[in-house]
Image (tube, grey):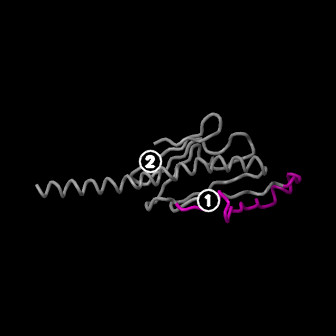
């Protein structure tokens, strides 16, 4: 009887750890859905593209300076201006993932992590995976983002 209780307690603790990671990943997805809306609003307001950059340890947003209106021959000869990361207390500042596991990100369509001044831009869907859990963020027709388990 004692062995059965020990096995059951072990199963509950493993399940609780997995559930904690799942909640952390869902919290990240919910925050990202809100930040995607903020990034889109910032791109529209400033006229600058906002780029979402991510890795296994965290993510950040950066703004690309406005392009100067120059003759096309000069534009081809110059290097593109680098994007500048948001810092300080900006909602688009760099953040670490909430889970202790490495997070893998898949963006659809590929390369769509740029928010432009158009009404709707940015990724159509983003899938976050931590090896155990998967959460999807999808862009609805009106441009807002929804988190799906």
Q: How busy is the neighbourhood of tag 1: few (under 14 within 10 Å), some, or many (20 plus)?
A: some
Q: Main secondary structure of the magenta part?
A: loop
Residue stretch in magenta? 68-96
Residue at the left extreme? 1
Q: Position of residue 91 (x, y in %)?
A: 65, 57
Query: Residue sitting at 54 percent across and 62 percent down?
Result: 96
- Residue that carries the numbered disc 1 in the rendered image: 60
Query: Which of 131/44 is in front?
Result: 44
Q: Position of residue 79 (x, y in %)?
A: 77, 61
Query: Residue sitting at 54 percent across and 46 percent down?
Result: 126
144 on left or right of 56:
right
Q: Position of residue 146 (x, y in %)?
A: 55, 41
The answer to whether 110 is drawn above or below residue 96 in the figure is above
Residue at the bottom extreme? 88
- Residue that carries the numbered disc 2 in the rendered image: 134
Tag 1 secondary structure: strand
Q: Quadrant of residue 83?
A: bottom right
12 on left or right of 32:
left
Query: Residue sitting at 78 percent across and 57 percent down?
Result: 65
* Mark 2–mark 1 CB contact (< 8 Å): no
* C-alpha span from label 2 to label 1: 20 Å
Residue at the top extreme? 141
Q: Position of residue 63 (x, y in %)?
A: 72, 57
Residue 84, magenta (yes or no): yes
Which mark sits nearer the N-terminus, 2 or 1?
1
Rendered-image quadrant of the N terminus: bottom left
Rendered-image quadrant of the C terminus: top left
């Amino acid at each position: 009887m004692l062995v059965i209780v020990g096995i059951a307690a072990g199963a509950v603790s493993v399940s609780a750890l997995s559930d904690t990671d799942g909640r952390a990943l869902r919290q990240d997805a919910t925050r990202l859905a809100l930040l995607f809306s903020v990034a889109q609003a910032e791109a529209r307001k400033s006229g600058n593209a906002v780029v979402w950059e991510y890795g296994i340890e965290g993510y950040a947003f950066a703004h690309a300076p406005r392009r100067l209106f120059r003759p096309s021959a000069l534009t081809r000869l110059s290097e593109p201006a680098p994007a500048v990361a948001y810092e300080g207390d900006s909602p688009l500042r760099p953040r670490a993932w909430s889970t202790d596991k490495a997070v893998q990100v898949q963006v659809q369509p590929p390369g769509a992590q740029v928010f432009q001044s158009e009404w709707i831009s940015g990724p159509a869907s983003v899938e976050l995976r931590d090896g155990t859990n998967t959460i999807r963020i999808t862009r609805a027709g009106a441009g807002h983002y929804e988190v799906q388990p």
